[in-house]
Image (cartoon, grey):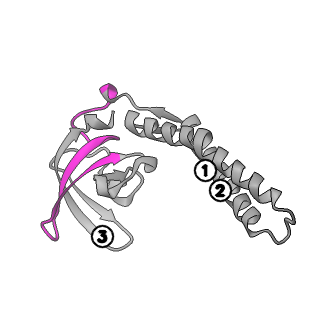
Amino acid sequence: MEYLSKEGHDKIAAELENLISVEFPKIKDALSEARAQGDLSENFEYRAARRAQAKMISRIRFLQNVLKYSRVIDTKTLPRDQVTLLSRVGFTNLDTGDQMSYTIVSPHEMNLQEGKISLKSPIGEALMGKKAGDEVVVHAPAATLRLRIDSVSMDISGQ
């Protein structure tokens, strides 16, 4: 089981609803039109529509399973002084002096442009359970990083 923020759960549910009620009917219509053109053995539109249909079904099933096997996390039950899911963590790279701040989220909500890293990423795993002032060593694929946690707060916008 995985935990999602309320925002992440709602975003996945909205995508699923859009795929089922809007996008999938469009693909079914395209498939019907392509089938009506006759010979299916050399019908490019038919093969393309079948591929799109298979891709759509796969995405729908994936999203259904994500929602089925996940729960919305209650931020009231999370500790405020240590890094957990939905924590906003400010830290300094001790080797370069660079300061960064990220929110720890589930893998399904990860988005670096929005400042969200997965709790299953090397940095996320190393930070989990730590407190402000702690130093951690992160074994990332590109390098080994030494980080100092400067601040930990709860990202209420994720709920």
What amino acid type should be assigned to the residue bearing mark 1?
Answer: Arg
Q: Earlier in the sequence, mark 2 or mark 3?
A: 2
Query: Residue 121, relative to residue 60: is it above or below?
Result: below
Q: Does 100 sit left or right of 72 as displayed?
A: left
Q: Is residue 50 above or below residue 133?
A: below
Q: Disc 3 marks which residue?
A: 144
Element at label 3:
strand
For badge 3, the amino acid type reads Thr
Residue 70 position in % (x across, y down): 52, 36
Residue 20 drawn at (x, y percent): 61, 40
**Which label was assigned to residue 128?**
none
Q: Is residue 25 visible?
A: yes
Q: Which residue is mark 1?
A: 59
| Residue 31 placement (x, y as % from top left) | 74, 54
In the rendered structure, which segment of residues is drawn in magenta?
Answer: 76-104
Q: Within 10 angstroms of label 1, few (less than 14), some, or many (20 or more) residues?
A: some
Quadrant hosting residue 78: top left
Discs 1, 2 touching: Cβ within 8 Å: yes
Cα separation between marks 1 and 2: 6 Å
- In the rendered image, the residue lying farthest to the top is 76
Q: Nearer the viewer, mark 2 or mark 3?
A: 2
Residue that badge 2 annotates: 55
Q: Quadrant of residue 93?
A: bottom left
Q: CA distance from mark 2 to mark 3?
A: 38 Å
Query: Magenta segment: does it hold 22?
Result: no
User: Which residue type does callout 2 highlight?
Assistant: Lys
Question: Which residue is found at the position 39% from the left and 71% from the top?
Answer: 141
Instruction: State the residue lying farthest toward the front.
Output: 37
- Most foreground residue, 56 or 103: 56
Residue 24 spot, x, y in % from top left: 64, 46
Q: Of helix, strand and loop, which one carries label 1?
A: helix
